[in-house]
């Protein structure tokens, strides 16, 4: 089955410099978009918020504290969704399905700078879905007591950007400039 989630990231440095206004909110699985008040007044449109409901909407814009190890966790009383929350909501579900023998795919979509890499890979102590999943896979394998049971782990990681597919497990200097060749079966 297909499940869809949205994650609201913190402002980046450029947005902070421009004094960007926050125009998005979440309420449970619902993402709410609101035009900034002055834009709504100028255009006469967009006074009403637009609501979109997904399987999950994660608030990661603010409300976090940075631990001594660098991990960003929810501050007391905050609705901040940390990396572990995102993994538990989507990553564990995919991992459990793969463990049952199903082929699985996790797909991150969004414009440049939207936070896809942070959610998928993370950085530093804030590991994303992929490294947490890898750790979980090898924990499960290590817990196996059946000597007749063997495991094969295969992973691929690709990026589609400007209609080019790149294998992210190949060092950038070794990747074909025009991306991987795509073949279509008839």
Image: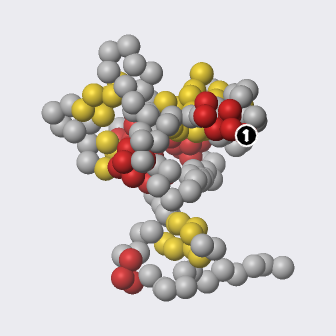
Residue visible at 56% across and 42% down in the picture: 94
Residue 186 locus on image (x, y percent): 84, 79
The one nearer the camera, 27 or 133, is 27
The one nearer the camera, 52 or 82, is 52
Q: Name the residue that disc number 1 marks.
A: 43
**Which image quadrant: the N terminus?**
top right
Residue 134 locus on image (x, y percent): 39, 49
Residue visible at 61% across and 34% down in the picture: 38
Q: Residues within 10 Å of mark 1 (few under 14, many from 20)?
A: few
The answer to whether 180 appears left or right of 77 in the picture is right
The answer to whether 151 appears left or right of 56 in the picture is left
- Residue 12 visible from this viewpoint: no
Residue 86 locus on image (x, y percent): 47, 35
| Outermost residue, front side | 42
| Outermost residue, right side | 186
Q: How many marks on residues? A: 1
On the image, which quarter does residue 168 sit in?
Answer: bottom left
Q: Secondary structure at mark 1?
A: helix
| Outermost residue, top side | 77
On the image, which quarter does residue 27 sit in?
Answer: top right
- Residue 173 visible from this viewpoint: yes
Q: What sort of colour scheme is used for the picture?
A: secondary structure
The one nearer the camera, 70 or 111, is 111
Residue visible at 38% across and 13% down in the picture: 77
Q: Say if 3 sits above or below 30 in the image.
A: below
Residue 160 locus on image (x, y percent): 58, 68
């Amino acid at each position: 089955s297909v499940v869809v989630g949205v994650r609201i990231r913190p402002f980046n440095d450029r947005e902070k410099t421009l004094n960007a206004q926050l125009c998005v909110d979440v309420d449970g699985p619902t993402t709410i978009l609101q035009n900034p008040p002055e834009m709504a007044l100028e255009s006469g449109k967009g006074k009403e918020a637009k609501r979109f409901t997904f399987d999950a909407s994660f608030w990661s814009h603010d409300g976090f504290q940075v631990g001594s190890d660098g991990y960003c966790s929810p501050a007391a009383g905050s609705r901040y969704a940390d990396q572990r929350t995102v993994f538990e909501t989507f990553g564990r579900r995919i991992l459990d399905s793969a463990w049952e023998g199903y082929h699985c795919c996790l797909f991150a979509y969004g414009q440049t700078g939207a936070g896809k890499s942070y959610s998928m890979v993370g950085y530093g102590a804030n590991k994303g879905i992929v490294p947490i999943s890898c750790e979980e896979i090898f924990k499960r394998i290590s817990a196996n007591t059946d000597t007749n049971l063997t495991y094969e782990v295969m992973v691929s990681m690709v990026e589609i950007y400007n209609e080019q597919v790149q294998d992210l497990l190949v060092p950038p200097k070794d990747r074909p400039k025009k991306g991987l060749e795509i073949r279509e079966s008839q």
